[in-house]
Every structure is written in C-alpha cells, then in structure tokens.
Amino acid sequence: MSNGANDKLPMTIRGKALLDAELKKLLLEERPSVILAIEEARAQGDISENAEYEAAKERQSMIEGRIAEIQGKLAGADVIDVSLIKSDRVVFGAHIKATDVETEEKISYQIVGVDESDVKKGMISILSPLARAMIGKRVGDTVTVQSPKGDKEFEITFFEFK
C-alpha cells in the first residue's frame, strides 16, 4: 500500500485528539501494566500451562497491534481545522442539513474521518454513501443515495463549517 500525499485520509482536529489520547493511554498505562502482568506470571514458574501468562501475552499482542494501527492512522492523516474551511460546496468537515424528498424527514450530519464516524452522534464517515453523494454539492441540490430499502433522495437545505 503506497502512502503518498494523495493517499492521506482527512481527519478533524477532534479526531486526531481522540487517537492521540488513546495512543497515550496505551503507551503509558496499558503497555506497562501488561508487561508487569507477564513478569508476574513468569515468576510463578512453569509458563507452559500458565493461563495468566497466556492471557497477558494475548493482551500484549492486542495492545501492540492497536498501537501500530493508531500510529499508522496518524501518519497517514491529513488533519484539517474544519472551522477554517470556506467553501460554497459541501466538502469534508461540513455540518449538513438535508430533507428526505419523499418523507420530508430532516437529517443533520457532519462529514468526518473514518475513525470519527458515529451515526448516533450525527457524524458520518467521508467514505459513507451519503457523504460521498453530498461532496461537491451546493444548497438546493438533490442527491440520490442507494440504501437497503431502495434509492433515497435528499435535498441539501443548509451546510456550514464550524
């Protein structure tokens, strides 16, 4: 997998801060605690049938994997201060309001990085079908999104960067 400038995934400042905090916790708390658990299990003698040792080694593997994953995501991130964006079109970071053309149901989302998305909190991934349909559009434009229940049309009624 190449990681040139064009391969960077956008991430908000908030998203970067969340990953930084998780990485710090893994490095300063989780890693030292699992190393201690391994040492304590080793001190019990025969490790070939030691369940505590096996569990600690498995946890260590998960921690190290997550550390590497976060470091990779941070290295491949294009961190964007959404509040500085000035655009007359929907782009990454936009807070969007739209209306379902058929049901007139109103929706409201912010387009965020992949790791930040949480639909329940109104944050959708830049790679989601809805976000991809809205990127590049203006207020008044209608977008069609394929969903499991069939195509849905939304009219973009408002967007801002904050």
Image (cartoon, grey):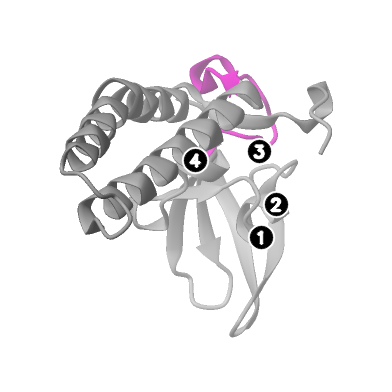
130 and 17: which one is in front?
17
For marks 2 and 4 on the same chain, the one whose residue lies earlier in the sequence: 4
Circles 2 and 4, Cβ within 8 Å, touching? The answer is no
Residue 64 seen from this side: yes
Q: Secondary structure at mark 4?
A: helix
Nearest to viewer (mark 3 / mark 2):
2
How dense is the environment of label 3, judged by Cα within 10 Å: few (below 14), some, or many (20 and up)?
Answer: many
- Measuring 61% from the left and 63% from the top, which residue is drawn there? 154
Residue 7 versus residue 93: which sits nearer the camera? 7
Marking on residue 132:
2
Say which amino acid is labelled 4.
Gly
Residue 160 can be seen, yes or no: no
Task: Report how far apart the C-alphas of labels 2 and 1 lie in the structure.
Answer: 5 Å
Residue receiving disc 3? 90
- The Cα–Cα distance between marks 3 and 2, rounded to whole angstroms, is 10 Å
Q: Is residue 119 above or below residue 72?
A: below
- The x, y position of residue 134, in whole percent, is 67, 50
Sequence-first disc among 1 and 3: 3
Compared across the picture, whether 100 is left or right of 76 comes to: left
* 82 in magenta: yes
Q: Point out the frontmost of discs 1 and 4.
A: 4
Q: Which residues are magenta?
A: 79-95
